[in-house]
Image (cartoon, grey):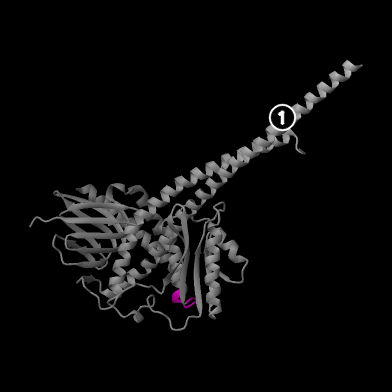
Amino acid sequence: MGESLRDIQRKIQAVKKTKQITKAMNMVASAKLRNAQLRIERFRPYADKYFEVISDLAGRVDASSYPLLEKREEIKTVGIVLITSDKGLCGAFNANLCTAALKLAQSKQSEGKEVKFICIGKRARDFFRKTEFEILEEKIEVLNHFDFQLANEVGETVIDKFLARHVDEVYVVFGKFVTIIKQEPTIAKVLPVESGAKSGDSSSEYVFEPSVEGLLTELLPRYVKVQIYRALLDTSASEHAARMTAMDNATKNCNELVNSLTLVYNKARQASITAELMDIVGGAEALKNA
Amino acid sequence: MAGKLKLEIVTPDRMLLSEEVEYVGAPGIEGEFGVLPNHIPFLSALGIGSLYYKQNNKTYYVFVAGGFVEVSKDKVSVLAEIAERAEEIDLERAKQAMERAKRRLQEQADKEAYARAKASLAKAMHRMRCKTAAQLR
């Protein structure tokens, strides 16, 4: 057997304690997930409306006169905003995001473009600190509690860098929340703004105040922030969902381990009882013979 | 004409309000405007200030800042960055925020900080104005 009974028992206790922790984490994650999902649902109509209006407005103007809409002819530098969680213990979630971002960066690099990163979340920062890519900015430990203000800040930074021509394109890599068991690393282009507008399609006749131009200048930066906020919300929900699944699996594994260890324990106990009995019987036989 | 307007106020974090109203007055970026039923389709950026609406001869106030308003035939959608009902405004907090912003304005910081302080001052003042307007009713 090699292990004494007491050793096995200790191991069983340890696994049971681990199980308690993973179970608690699972429950915490599911509670947080519910909140995060609610927030996404509440935000969706807002984001959709924004998209609608921006598409409508952008269809009416010449894109090249707006720096945020204009596609630059020569793209030298690409900015990637990578959003991951701060904490681990959520399966391959962060790793998937980082790999997706890395792949994107490498493909851009092979096209001869320079790639710079803005990392949100500790995991993103830690991963890309080890690579050769430059990190323009990092924000860590912000995803636990965030509101639109965070999207504001990130959006502001991104827009500044874009307008100052430090970057010519900006992508966001985030964990899209599909279902509880499915989260997809997703790449979305935020700058220049892709409006999906069909020019010349102005079916609705609006009166604008201020002018279409004035509105666009006002709303385009906001739209960028709205997109970033959406990515943040999605990532946070995905993180909790991923953690929930990971912890659920861990709890299951703990159960299995406890079962198999109990089996080993019982076998060992029986073996030791048998051995003891043999000793006693052997001793009694020896006495009788004497 | 006694038509009704559907008023919706949405912020990034919640749907503040969705109601049938008779009149909406909103602070556009170029001045206040009023909307009655059967307004022409209209789109305006939102400034900082008090939005108010009339319902059953009562007037209600909502503080709004940033975003835009879309008016289609019988519907007014307000997509604001911040929106608070007058009842939710904490007058004391707004006062403190105003004092803070005033102090910061005097510190003569860089341009950016100045602009930020000015914006928060405007927000605080309009919050207070919104609250007082609602209390006077």
Q: Nearer the viewer, residue A32 or A175?
A: A175
The image position of residue B121, as x and y in percent, is: 36, 59
Q: Nearer the viewer, residue A254 or A266?
A: A266
Q: Amino acid at mark 1?
A: Gln
The image position of residue A170, as x and y in percent, is: 46, 72
Q: Nearer the viewer, residue A27 or A209?
A: A27
Q: Is residue B120 left or right of residue A53?
A: right
The image position of residue A268, as x and y in percent, is: 72, 33
Q: Quadrant of the N terminus of chain A?
A: top right
- A191 over B101 or under it: above or below: below
SS state under label 1: helix
Whether residue A19 is visible here, answered yes or no, is yes
Q: Nearer the viewer, residue A148 or A227?
A: A227
Whether residue A136 is visible here, answered yes or no, is no
Q: Which residue is mark 1?
A: A270
Report the predominant secondary structure element of the magenta stretch: loop
Residue occupying image coordinates x 57% and y 63%? A125
The image position of residue A156, as x and y in percent, is: 43, 67
Q: Quadrant of the C terminus of chain A?
A: top right
- In the picture as drawn, the residue positioned furthest to the front comes out as A289
Q: Quadrant of residue B113?
A: bottom left
- B44 over A247 or under it: above or below: below
Classify mark 1: residues with Cα within 10 Å, few (<14), some (14-19) or many (20+): few
Q: Is residue A282 left or right of residue A161?
A: right
Residue occupying image coordinates x 56% and y 58%? A122
What is the span of residues highlighted in magenta in the rendered image?
A: A162-167
Residue occupying image coordinates x 60% and y 61%? A126
Q: Is residue A124 left or right of residue B123?
A: right
Residue occupying image coordinates x 43% and y 57%? A177
Disc 1: host chain: A
